[in-house]
Amino acid sequence: MNGKYETHEHDVLVIGAGGAGLRAAIEALAQGASVGVVCKSLLGKAHTVMAEGGIAAAMANVDEADDWRAHFRDTIRGGKFLNNWRMAQIHAQESSERVRELEQWGALFDRTKDGRILQRAFGGHTFKRLCHVGDRTGLEMIRTLQDRGVQMGFDVYMECAITRLLKDGDRLAGAFGYWRENGRFVVFKAKSVVLATGGIGKAWPITSNSWEYTGDGMALAYDAGAELMDMEFVQFHPTGMVWPPGVQGILVTEAVRGEGGILRNKTGERFMERYDPKRMELSTRDVVARAIYTEVREGRGTEHGGAYLDISQKPAEYVKRKLPSMYHQFLELADVDITKGPMEVGPTCHYMMGGVKVEADTAASTVPGLFAAGEVAAGLHGANRLGGNSLSDLLVFGRRAGLVAAQHAKATVAPSLDPGQIDSAERAMLAPFERKEGESPYALHSDLQENMQKLVGIFRTEEDLRQALTKIEELKERSQRMSVSGSRMFNPGWHLGRDLESMLTVVEAVTRSALARQESRGAHSRIDYPDLDLSWGKQNNVIARKNERMELRQVPIPDMPEDLQVLLTEEKGSAA
């Protein structure tokens, strides 16, 4: 290594410091492993804080009939039967215990009259199941996990971006990255790496996601030889702010509908009666998002191209108590008092169901030593995620990833780092500085976002998707000529240039998978194939890198054991 790079060594390296990353780090520490946590921004800035509504867990504190079987059934139905059934089973069985653990570690929850954790209704859930803290649940979860992790003693590397995973033969050996502040390179040596880097929302212009969400973990895994799965399933949350332009896309929690909010079009009609008369506003996110989109497209949208969401029929004090963040968000950002009038909302790119293909019990990818948990991993949510399942996903599979990563580290000898891989990672990062005239990362990003919004959005067609792929190839070529000026000291253009590489990988995977799936299912809607196709319900699209090219194949979904199948046949009518 000849001391050329700053180097840190750990048994387990966790990339990402949201709910999944922190829970993985806590578990690995509990196993006696040395743990490093790398985060692209500051500790506490993770996207988990944006999760407002609650943590889905069948604790039966409010609805006594609830149990893990009902939660399992709702998750599989919401995911349109594409879920990894074993992940859905583990998730439903373990989430209550994970919530109780959070409570023991100091998380404060809203309470029932007899002092138990209060649970609220949410779209797609049969029972009141979301444990919450007003509408700030994710924030409380991050605070609790952070306090716990810091107290237990993990090393945190903040504002550090990982650009490549390093390998020793087939297995993982660590990671290469740089400090965003000064641009200096840093090497991490580790026996196990856990990816917990979240989603891909910044590939679309209207998104609830913040700047970190550029698909880094999925691209790192893909480049290291891991497989990606279900990449066509990108969830558009039905309710983001649409006005004013500066706050476009900021999330309006589903809890507004859970607490009784009503959706109306510009004529005042409660339009969800047409799309899902049984569940109305508490239908699944894909149905509500398409309903609002259709209302706007057919000329019944609001002034700024959305729908009205109104909870002002509830007492003002109730709204302020149940939805404090939403009350302040609209008052401060849009000058709207939600206790007196409606909010204007519309679909916003929100969550990625697809990601790194992992084993259900171990969170292991196909690359030895590489694990993934949370939004970066695929399988649990199938074709569409239910609200609240993301936070319990982070806890359940974050814990499992940390546990198995620590066990893997204990059982393996230290890998060796290959100087050649490190040198090539450095050259790739410095190349844009050497091009004096070239493409601007900002122009490239803007074109990429426009392409995805226009051609790979809520509704898709073969013609649009083929056009999108041609455009992505063009963007990839242009990115080879990308140039940045200035120094490596905090250089946003340089950072964006690196993020674009990740985004170009994930948007190609999304578009290829969307083109292959000739049906409409969950969050994936094809205008040219509007119906569910039973043959597509038996297979997942899997993406892998072969000879520098992206290859897609279909993999059959493993058969579900009979005892679980029986749970789904109750009210079988809703298999669609």
Image: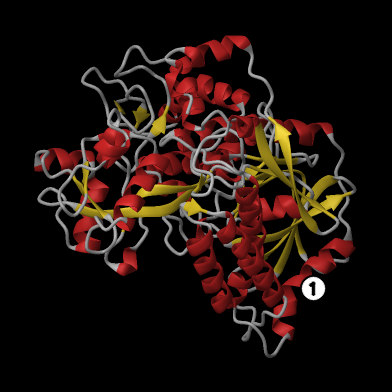
- Residue 24 percent location from the top left of the image: 60, 37
Q: Residue at x 44, y 27 (%)?
A: 99
The correct choice, above or below, for 534 with respect to 294 in the image is above
Q: Quadrant of residue 503?
A: bottom right
The correct choice, above or below, for 420 with respect to 354 in the image is below
Q: Residue at x 23, y 17 (%)?
A: 114
Q: Quadrant of residue 478?
A: bottom right
Q: Amino acid at mark 1?
A: Arg
- Do we see residue 211 in this rendering? no
Instruction: Look at the image and name its color scheme.
Output: secondary structure
- Do we see residue 327 in this rendering? yes
Which quarter shows the N terminus? bottom right
Pick out the residue farthest to the bottom.
Answer: 437
Q: Residue at x 66, y 82 (%)?
A: 483
- Residue 345 percent location from the top left of the image: 28, 54
Q: Residue at x 74, y 85 (%)?
A: 434
- Residue 569 percent location from the top left of the image: 49, 13
Question: Helix or strand or loop: what does disc 1 sit on?
Answer: helix
Check disc 1 and report the residue beneath it: 427
- For residue 59, side relative to residue 12 (left or right): left
Report the number of discs. Answer: 1
Q: Quadrant of residue 423?
A: bottom right
- Residue 359 percent location from the top left of the image: 70, 31
Q: Rate crowding at label 1 as few (under 14), some (14 to 19) or many (20 or more) other CA atoms within 10 Å.
A: few
- For residue 307, side relative to residue 499 (left or right): left
The foreground one among 45 and 558 is 558
The foreground one among 567 and 518 is 518
- For residue 233, side relative to residue 10 (left or right): left
